[in-house]
Image (cartoon, grey):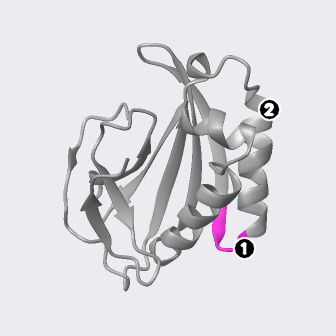
Amino acid sequence: MHRRARRSTQPLDGRDSLVRDLILQFHPQRAPRLPLTKVLERLAQVAAALPEVKAMTFMRGRDRGPYVDVSFTIAAKYLPKLWSQILSRSLGRDSLGRALRSASMVYCEGSMGWDNYKLLHHFDSRQTLDRLLPSNTSLERTRER
């Protein structure tokens, strides 16, 4: 994540109807054989399958190497549903999913926007991750390996 913000363990309230962004940041140098077009196709399939997704956009950037931010705009209460679909359809066990997992991080806005963002996935397994709980939209801090 390239924004300077603090992380918080405050839960994201399931009654929060505000629109939030969930971003998958792809680092192509970490998976040189994975074409950006394949990544975008796979993520577009996720967005198309969820009518709750208001928009999907992408932006290229450069900060200690090239990256592409793929942003999904969705009501906060649907973040767990979106995250579940990204996990199963884009970061799954197939070869594209494995390559994308090793070359991406995923984060979303918290209850205070980007001031307390939530890190959901990181290519560096030593990072402490937040977890969206599917039964409600609260977030909890966890160490995932």
Identify the residue at horizontal 73%, vertical 38% (top origin). Answer: 96
Magenta range is 50-54
Q: Main secondary structure of the magenta part?
A: loop
Identify the residue at horizontal 48%, vertical 13% (top origin). Answer: 65
Identify the residue at horizontal 27%, vertical 58% (top origin). Answer: 142
Q: Which residue is mark 2?
A: 37
Q: Which sits earlier in the primary sequence, circle 2 or circle 1?
A: 2
Q: Mark number for residue 51?
A: 1
Please indicate whether residue 86 sits to the left or right of residue 51 in the image: left
In percent of width and height, residue 54 lies at 64, 65
Please indicate whether residue 8 sits to the left or right of residue 29 in the image: left
Q: Mark number for residue 113?
A: none
Q: Amino acid at mark 2?
A: Thr
In percent of width and height, residue 15 lies at 37, 86
Q: Quadrant of residue 26?
A: top right
In percent of width and height, residue 81 lies at 57, 72
Residue 40 higher or lower than 29, as above or below: below
Q: Amino acid at mark 1?
A: Pro
